[in-house]
Image: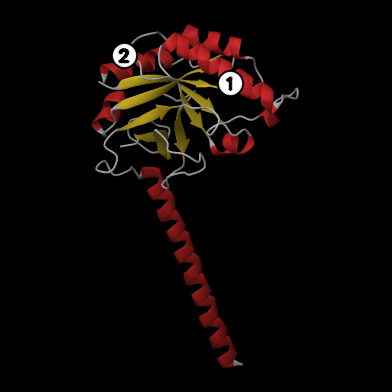
Amino acid sequence: MGRKRKKSGWKASILAFLALAGIAGGGWLWWQARVWQPDPVLYPDQGVVIGAGQGPVGFRTVAALGAGFAYLAASDGTTGKDARFARNLAAAREAGLQAGAVHHFDPCAMADGQSANFVTMVPRGASMLPPAIQLDRTADDCIEPVSDAMIASELMTLINQIEMHAGKPVILMVHRQFEARHPVSARIERNLWVSGTWREPTYAGRPWLLWTANEALSLEASEEPIGWVVARP
């Protein structure tokens, strides 16, 4: 009986050690994911993307940490507006960062209202980076059914309208779930922006221009995580 208890004790100790090692390893990976930034030697052109509703951001600190540009949430669908966009744009420029605007595409809404919303928020100007259209919501989120053909048509209309205002081709910020549901990367010839922490994403099927390499980077520049972006060398 004593030997059996002794063996059982060793097994329990080993299992406990392995469990602790797994917890420690998971904690280390979680921490690395929060602080990891791509090698600037491999990706010399790096920046940030500031999402809608993001709190105050210290753009001078962002610049000091190696960013050269900032993309800022501006408009969402037909009515959504980021209240901090104008302040963020001014602050980013004062910090010496190039700045661009992001429109969040609503597949349930018509293009005319979305482009009008963008135009009221984003100024024209040669100093602005090419605008980006964020594509992550799908037709599955719509209350009323929307066909794939309708989404493709409205998206193309929106692209043309935003480009007319900006005077520059848009960048399509295509998220994995949108590409899986509404493949656009192979159908629309625009530069792509993909997302995926640590590993370079391949879901778009062709080369990207921008990559959000850390989707939730912890920086002293903000109380909330920030997306850290690299440009293709």
Q: Secondary structure at mark 1?
A: helix
Q: Residue furthest right?
A: 144
Q: Quadrant of residue 210?
A: top left
What crowding class fits label 1: few (fewer than 14 Cα within 10 Å), some (14-19), or many (20 or more)? many
Query: Residue sitting at 27 percent across and 25 percent down?
Result: 60
- Tell me: residue 205, above or below residue 99: below
x then y, percent, for residue 128: 35, 15
Query: Residue sitting at 45 percent across and 31 percent down?
Result: 192
- Residue 22 shows in the view: yes
Q: Quadrant of the C terminus?
A: top left
User: What color scheme is it?
Assistant: secondary structure
Is 54 on the left-hand or right-hand side of 94?
Answer: right
State the mark number for residue 118: none
Q: Quadrant of the N terminus?
A: bottom right
- Tell me: residue 122, above or below residue 132: above
The answer to which of 138 and 11 lies nearer the viewer is 138
Query: Residue sitting at 60 percent across and 14 percent down?
Result: 111
State the mark number for residue 127: 2
What is the distance, in whole Å, between disc 1 and disc 2 at their CAs?
25 Å
State the mark number for residue 155: 1
Under mark 2, the amino acid is Ser
Q: Nearer the viewer, mark 1 or mark 2?
A: 1
x then y, percent, for residue 44: 26, 37
Q: Quadrant of residue 93?
A: top left
Query: Residue sitting at 62 percent across and 24 percent down?
Result: 152
Is 203 on the left-hand or right-hand side of 142?
Answer: left
